[in-house]
Amino acid sequence: MKTILVVGGAGYIGSQMVKQLLATGNYHVVTLDNLSHGYRDAIIGGDFVLGDLADRTGLDHLLADYQFDGIIHFASFIEVGESMQQPGKYYQNNVAGTLNLLDAIISHGAPPIIFSSTAAIFGEPQYTPIDEQHPTQPINPYGKTKWMIEHILADYGRAHQLKFTCLRYFNAAGADPEGQLGERHQPETHLIPLVLQAASGRRSHLTIFGQDYDTPDGTGIRDYIHVYDLCQAHLLALEQLWQGADSTAYNLGNGTGFSVKQVIETANLVTGNTIPIVMGTRRKGDPARLVADSTHAKLKLNWQPQYADLTTIITHAWQWEQQLIR
Ligand code: UDP
């Protein structure tokens, strides 16, 4: 039985990862989380260690207590707008925290690490779909922290024989297909949960951020990828590193873009409600279109998304929203 450390395992994607690792029956799972944004009740099994990446001594104790075969690192602050207002908070937590983690890892046998990266490292797209060769020019501190960590990993890889895979998520969405877990961000800034909160009555309306983009209906286009499928990619990436693959990066999306209006129309059908909308202005820093080319992940990881259909993604998120309001 291999032992995996999930850093940030109490969060939206991390908790789903813990669930999927446990479901295989092949892994002993340890979650490290400071519960600043995650939820203790989202960790459905394995061991839990309350701790912070700022605490290097605590990390050393944790890595000495367990012999980890692999690390999956989700812990980071993720709000673009907040990162523009408080960049130091992002560089401290995301970059300095990851440096502590990496230093602890390399002094305890350097098990391979899967790192949660983001499409935000690419900045304003120069072409779509975005493949791994696309230039990386992040336009906000959040994206810059992830870009920096990718470079730090490359340097640690060369210097310390650390194996790593960077997974650049496009728009993580949906919820546990079994209805047990889902998104609970405070504050919520993501489109699909906000749309569904407007459908359930938890919010009065959804504001569309801009309808003057250069897209067919004028609203922003994104590539929504199911949280379950993202987690499967982590597992495949880890297995690939254990089998001796080189460190690399993969872009993870479905390769199909949906506009804000298309998301709302699909949510209207799924929920049977007409979601109240208000037309607003563009949100600063939002590109018109972000769509992934995930050919590399499909070929090299043999990654096959199970829930690529937008209706399914929204159906699972709606199941979760209904559970929250119960
Ligand atoms: N969006 C919107 N209203 C909202 C939240 C988001 O119109 O209340 C739009 C946003 O401008 C973008 C898309 O929905 O085009 C997805 O935004 P989200 O914040 O979910 O993800 P991002 O792509 O910013 O990471």
Image (tube, rainbow, N blue to C red):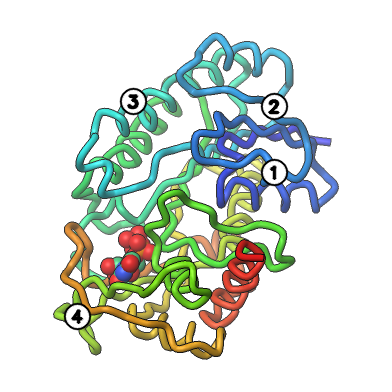
Would you call the spot at circle 1 few (<14 residues within 10 Å), some (14-19), or many (20 or more)?
Answer: few
Which residue is identified by label 3? 92
**Residue 180, image x, y percentages:** 72, 59
The kind of residue on which mark 1 rests is Asp
Which residue is identified by label 1? 41
Above or below: residue 108 compared with residue 207: above
**Figure quadrant of residue 78:** top left
| Dot in front, 4 or 2 | 4
The kind of residue on which mark 3 rests is Gln
Is there CB contact under 8 Å for labels 2 and 3?
Answer: no
Q: Which mark is residue 68?
A: 2
Q: CA distance from mark 2 to mark 1?
A: 24 Å
Residue drawn at 30 percent across, 53 percent down: 120
Which residue is identified by label 4? 211
Task: Please tell me which of labels 2 and 1 falls first in the chain.
Answer: 1
Is there CB contact under 8 Å for labels 4 and 2?
Answer: no
